[in-house]
Amino acid sequence: MTEIGRIPGGNEAHRTQAVGRTAGRNEGQDRQSAPAGIERGRDTVDVSDTARAAAARLVGEETDIRQDLVDRVRSEIQSGEYESPTKIAGTIDTILDSLS
């Protein structure tokens, strides 16, 4: 199996407590053995090639993010320069064109 790191997105929920069957167990407490004659199944995860490629892009050097552009736009938004009548009119025109 391939290990995939956390995918950043700014909207992550971080769980700090166990849930389900593991809730209430002490950390490090081993799973109880199955009664004699009962075999527990094993969980598996199949990851598609597309998901593997996406994960590789996130952790590798391959990126389509233009950090210089992101930094410039972020700076313009914070300073109040990003929204202008020209940009708003252009956005409205683009939306109207896509609807017709």
Image (spheres, rainbow, N blue to C red):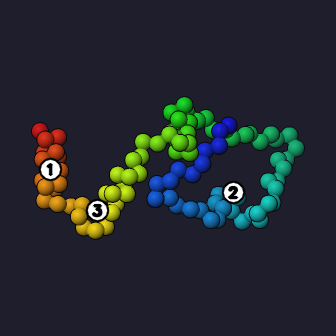
Q: Position of residue 60 (x, y in %)?
A: 56, 42
Q: Position of residue 70 (x, y in %)?
A: 37, 54
Nearer to us of marks 2 and 3 is 3
State the residue position of label 1.
Answer: 90
Using residue 20 as the reference point, say whether residue 11 is left or right of it.
left
Q: Residue at x 69, y 57 (%)?
A: 21
Label disc, if present, on residue 76 of the rendered structure:
3
Using residue 87 as the reference point, say whether residue 40 is left or right of it.
right
Label disc, if present, on residue 21 of the rendered structure:
2
Report, in whole angstroms, how far the alpha carbon at label 2 lies from the one at label 1. Answer: 54 Å
Q: Residues within 10 Å of mark 2 (few under 14, many from 20)?
A: few
Residue 29 falls in which quadrant of the image? bottom right
The total of numbered circles placed on residues is 3
Residue 20 falls in which quadrant of the image? bottom right
On screen, 46 above or below 8? above
Residue 12 in view here: yes
**Circle 2: residue type:** Arg
Label disc, if present, on residue 20 of the rendered structure:
none
**Circle 3: residue type:** Glu
